[in-house]
Amino acid sequence: MTAQTRYPGPLSLANAKTALNLSDPLTDAAFDRDGPRANVEYRDLGLAKATGGKIGAKHIRAIRPFDKETGWHWHDMTGHFVYVLKGWIKFKFENVPDEVVVKAGMCLSQPAGVPHNVVNQSDDLELIEINLPADYATIDLER
């Protein structure tokens, strides 16, 4: 069974729906601390630029021990995905009684717009986070 195509193709690179992007940690942007959490650092993987802002992706890694929960918040986005490369991260989600632990090799499709709280992480945490769209608001909730 062959799926129907969504657009005419094949396309030339000049007419592609997204740009060619290869993220290389040795030559691309270095990790920086420009993000919401002080205990991790971030490296942009170039998907926002390649997709015209439709998709964002960051490589995130711990730089010091986890010292406090993020607090309850939600993100104004339509898709949010976490793939843990190393270590683990622990979430609480609204109306979910148990904590959700995402370990190395696991992927979490985090429900977009749902209140959550990061409650713990390993000291060696390293993950890839993908969100749709690339730019989004984070709204803190009072509990």
Image (tube, helix red, strand yellow):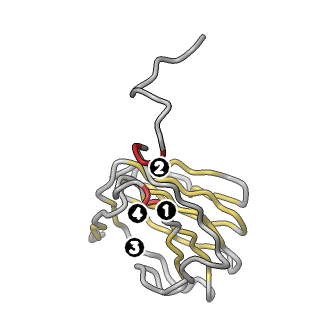
Q: Nearer the viewer, mark 3 or mark 2?
A: 3
Residue type highlighted by circle 4: Lys
Cβ–Cβ below 8 Å for labels 1 and 4? Answer: no
**Front residue of this view, candidates 35 and 64:** 35
List x then y, in percent, for residue 59: 57, 70
Question: How far across and how far down the image is residue 7, in percent?
Answer: 39, 28
Label 2 secondary element: loop
3 or 1: tag closer to the N-terminus:
1
Q: Between disc 3 and disc 4, whose residue precedes?
A: 4
First of labels 4, 2 by sequence position: 4
Residue appearing at x 51%, y 67% in the figure: 58
Amino acid type, label 3 = Gly
Q: Which mark is residue 49?
A: 4
Q: Identify the residue position indicated by label 1 in the image.
A: 57
Badge number at residue 96 = 2
- Above or below residue 1? Residue 118 is below
Tell me the amino acid under the disc marked 1: Ala
Query: Which mark sits nearer the N-terminus, 1 or 4?
Result: 4
Which mark is nearer the camera, 3 or 1? Answer: 1
Residue type of the residue flagged with mark 2: Val
Whole-percent x and y of residue 55? 41, 54
The quadrant of the rendering that contains the N terminus is: top right
The answer to whether the residue labelled 4 contacts the one labelled 2, judged by CB atoms less than 8 Å apart, is no
Q: CA distance from mark 3 to mark 1?
A: 22 Å
| Residue that numbered label 3 is attached to | 71
Tell me if mark 1 has few (under 14), some (14-19) or many (20+) residues whose alpha carbon lies within 10 angstroms of its own. Answer: many
N-terminal of the pair, mark 1 or mark 2, is 1
Q: CA distance from mark 3 to mark 4?
A: 30 Å
Q: Quadrant of residue 72?
A: bottom left
Disc 4 secondary structure class: helix
